[in-house]
Every structure is written in C-alpha cells, then in structure tokens.
Image (spheres, grey):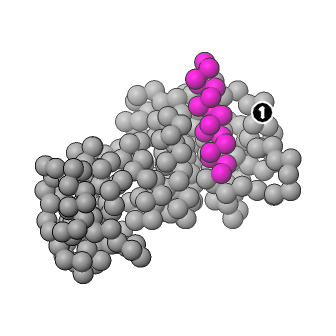
Amino acid sequence: MAAAVKLHRHVGRRRAARLLAEGPNLVEAALRRGLVSEVFATEAAATRFADLLAGAPVHLVTERAAKALSDTVTPVGLVAVCAMPEASLAAVLANAPRLVAVAADISEPGNAGTLIRLADAMGADAVVLAGHSVDPYNGKCLRASAGSIFAVPVISDPDAADVVDALAGAGLQVLATTLDGEVCLDDADLTPPTAWLFGPEAHGLSADLAAAATHRVRIPMPGHAESLNVASAAAICLYQSSRAHRRD
C-alpha cells in the first residue's frame, strides 16, 4: 500500500507508470479496459460494490488506510491501482482520425478532465494536452473525466507547435479558437477531419500557435460575456463538429 500512496504525486506516477483511480465510476471504467492491477477497499465498500469487484484482486483496508489512499474530502473507500493507458499521437494519426481536441497550456485539472469527458461524448478520436498542461492522471482531472480518460486516447506532449504540425501533416484542418478569429463558427466548414485547438482562459492561445492553425475561429457571442472558459468553448465546438460529421 505504501507504493500506492506514492502515486498521488506526479513523479511517483511517472516512475511507476501507474495511477490511482478512486470511486466506482473510475474503477469500473479501468476494470473494463483491463488496466487494474489491484484494488484497495474498506469492508463497507467491498460489500457495497461487490458486483463491480467480482473477480478483481481486492485487498481489504481500514478506513484510515483508505483515507491515506484518497485525495477527496469524503472518501468512498474504493481505490484501484491501474496501469497508465497506452496512447501516442503517432498511433492516433495512423488510424485516420476525424476529430481531435487539443488543449494548450491548460493548468486547471477540472477543465482538462471535463474536456476529456466532452471529447469522449462527442466521439472524438483523441485528446492532446499540449505545452505546459496539467497531468491528466492527477486525481481531480480523473474525477472530472468521469471515467472517459479510460475510453478515449489522451496524450501529453510538451511541444504544442510540433503537435499542430503533426496534425496538419496528417491531413487534418487545425481550427484555433480565438476571440478575433477571421472565421465565424457558424460559417466554418466542419466536414473535413478536424483538430480543434483550445487555449487557457486567462490569456488564450499564443499568437504563434494560433497563426500555425489552418483557420482561427470565433464563437459568436451576442450576449455581454467577453469570453468562455475552455470547457464551455470545447463543448460548443466539438458538438458542432460531431453534428457535421453525423450529417456527412
């Protein structure tokens, strides 16, 4: 169990290539993918989730031990040690993706996890967290993904410019969301394979990264709000792409 506790830290996850999935939604999603190596559960949780844990390697732990494994305020008493899903941009591009979500320099784990959940819901082929973005296997990001992190490939790449080049080189149009985009979302052609590029709410995409995109797209906002956070912008854009592909 001591080794599992170390997985709360990014360096521990990276060294072990393991992560902690807490709660029934994440544990179930990880079990479905065959990524679970062991499960720690209190006696109460093991009883409550007996059907879910049937056949899983479960270790009973005390409430105190479960709290040490948890990073939530009110632990449910169910934590799984999982192998990190294998994903690479090269493998995604080899399968001719039609929709990819790219977030550059996203530091808020809740936004990153919500983006992953959105991408999964809209049928995206992958999510790329580029530049100085949050670790997708941080506990808050995992919970915000609601298990989708085990359903859609999630790739971390520190070089956002290289990611854009690779996507464009594979034949995807790269659409950068900017407040002053030359193309209105209402008028954008979303039928081709598309990679959406989102930046942080605080200052948006860098000028260089936005300029590297095929087009810069603005979301029409007739109201008084000046901007949208990354999760809101992603929901609008990914839905529009998914809708265009369903009609195609």
Across and down, in percent, residue 201 comes to 67, 60
Q: In the picture, which quadrant includes the N terminus?
A: bottom left
Residue nearest the observer in this picture, 82 or 174: 82
Identity of the residue drawn at 41% across and 58% down: 142
Which residue ends up furthest to the bottom in the rendered image?
Answer: 64
Across and down, in percent, residue 63 comes to 24, 77
Residue nearest the observer in this picture, 34 or 47: 47
Q: Is residue 108 magenta?
A: no
Residue nearest the observer in this picture, 86 or 72: 72
Q: Which segment is the magenta one?
A: 232-248
Identity of the residue drawn at 17% across and 73% down: 61
Across and down, in percent, residue 202 comes to 69, 65
Identity of the residue drawn at 13% across and 56% down: 57
Q: Is residue 245 magenta?
A: yes
The residue carrying pointer 1 sits among few (fewer than 14), some (14 to 19) or many (20 or more) residues within 10 Å by Cα, namely few
Mark 1 lies on residue:
186
Residue 206 can be seen, yes or no = no
Picture quadrant where residue 77 is located: bottom left
**Secondary structure beneath label 1:** helix
Looking at the picture, which amino acid does disc 1 mark? Asp
Q: Is residue 170 above or below residue 127?
A: above
